[in-house]
Image: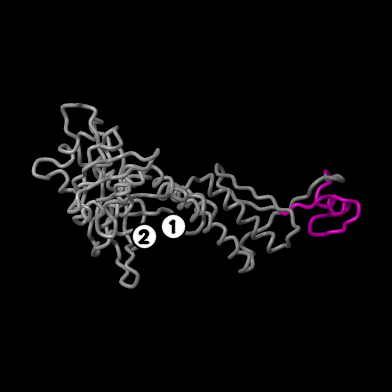
């Protein structure tokens, strides 16, 4: 039985990546908990787990005393001498105990400690794998669609995770077996409850990562993404500039006949994307950010505030439906924008 136990630990380490030393510590804690439940909370117990000899033994310890006040943890010198003449006052006498004699509740307590240890180790291993993917895009497969709340259970290749309805792009519709891209926003490894990983398709950085994946000039550092503002499912504005004066950053992102940006739009459900040329001149940058509206002038009014003038026919376009265009431009540039006709 002991041999099977240590073989099981080897298998656990091989298949689930849970170290044998970690499990030995958990098993020791489990046996300690079970024996104390069996014999009483004040009992002193020593656990021996010898991996080399494949032995697992448990000993109850009692201190050798003149007068016994607590028989659970003490033994008289006279009784100790009957066991062995070598025992002395202040020493310790050990009695081997057999786990097979456990009551059901004690055995169940040990089992729960071990199971909990395995779960914690699995959770920690999964968290470490996700940690390397934090703030990156991963491809997943839809495993289950919750028809009640719209959440998706997806297989990320590391584990099954939940993509909440609130983190899906408005208009997203997926079936079991569909492939989709998700952005890893947060990883929790130290908490025993709740999701290990938080996934999103509406995070602004998802658009940034898609551009980094699809545009070679961004990958090689020629074109730099300065900022992104997003209203998921509707519109995104992304500001870019080029380190090479011979490379047009906007043209590089859009591609010939929109081929490059087309792949990104397909992933985002045809969300509109405005690629804006970043300019170190705040007035020029704000004017470009308010595209597709044509701007007459931009006047800086304070450190992060500006007044924008447009012709009357461009006013609604500059502000956008429910103020969307102006809000996205403000977020993209970091300026508070006051638009007047």
Which residue is situated farthest in the right direction here?
A: 66
Kind of element beneath mark 2? strand
Judge the density around disc 1: few (<14), some (14-19), many (≥20) Cα neighbours within 10 Å: some
* Viewer-proximal residue among 141 and 255: 255
Give the quarter of the image for residue 248.
top left
Mark 2 or mark 1, earlier in chain: 2
Q: Which mark is residue 195?
A: 1
Residue nearest the viewer, comparing 201 with 293: 293
- The outermost residue toward the bottom is 148
Instruction: Tell me where residue 281 appears, x and y as whole percent.
Output: 29, 33
Horizontally, residue 226 falls left or right of residue 124, namely left
| Residue 189 placement (x, y as % from top left) | 48, 50
Q: Is residue 183 left or right of residue 252?
A: right
Q: Residues within 10 Å of mark 2 (few under 14, many from 20)?
A: many
* Residue 80: in magenta span: yes
| Point 35% across, 62% down: residue | 166
Label of residue 162 in the image = 2
Q: What element carries label 1?
A: loop
Q: Is 150 on the left or on the right of 178, as rendered?
A: right
Q: Residue 311: image x %, image y %? A: 19, 49
The residues bearing labels 2 and 1 have C-alpha atoms spaced at a distance of 8 Å
Residue pictured at 33% horizontal, 45% vertical: 136
The coloring applied to the image is one colour
Magenta segment: does it hold 295? no
Up the image or down, 209 lies above or below 110; here it is: above
Magenta span of residues: 60-86
């Amino acid at each position: 039985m002991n041999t099977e136990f240590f073989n099981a630990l080897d298998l656990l380490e091989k298949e689930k990546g849970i170290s044998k030393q970690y499990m030995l510590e958990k098993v020791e804690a489990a046996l300690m908990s079970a024996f104390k439940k069996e014999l009483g909370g004040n009992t002193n117990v020593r656990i021996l787990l010898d991996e080399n000899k494949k032995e697992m033994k448990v000993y109850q310890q009692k201190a050798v005393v003149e007068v016994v006040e607590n028989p659970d943890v003490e033994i008289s010198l006279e009784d100790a001498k009957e066991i062995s003449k070598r025992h002395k006052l202040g020493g310790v006498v050990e009695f081997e105990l057999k786990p097979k004699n456990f009551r059901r509740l004690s055995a169940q307590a040990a089992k729960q400690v071990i199971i909990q240890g395995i779960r914690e180790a699995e959770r920690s291993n999964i968290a470490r794998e996700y940690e390397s993917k934090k703030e990156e895009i991963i491809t997943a497969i839809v495993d289950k669609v919750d028809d009640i709340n719209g959440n998706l259970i997806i297989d990320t290749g590391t584990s099954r995770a939940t993509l909440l309805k609130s983190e899906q792009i408005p208009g997203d519709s997926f079936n079991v077996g569909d492939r989709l891209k998700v952005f890893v926003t947060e990883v929790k490894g130290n908490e025993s409850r709740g999701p290990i990983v938080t996934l999103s398709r509406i995070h602004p950085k998802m658009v940034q990562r898609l551009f980094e994946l699809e545009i070679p000039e961004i990958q090689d550092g020629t074109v730099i993404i300065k900022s992104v503002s997003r209203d998921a499912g509707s519109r995104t504005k992304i500001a870019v500039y080029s380190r090479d004066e011979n490379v047009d950053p906007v043209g590089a992102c859009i591609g010939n006949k929109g081929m490059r940006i087309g792949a990104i739009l397909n992933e985002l459900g045809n969300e509109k994307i405005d690629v804006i040329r970043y300019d170190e001149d705040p007035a020029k940058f704000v004017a470009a950010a308010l595209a597709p509206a044509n701007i007459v002038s931009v006047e800086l009014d304070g450190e992060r505030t500006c007044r924008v003038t447009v012709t009357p026919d461009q006013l609604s376009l500059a502000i956008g439906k429910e103020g969307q265009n102006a809000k996205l431009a403000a977020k993209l540039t970091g300026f508070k924008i006051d638009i007047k006709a």
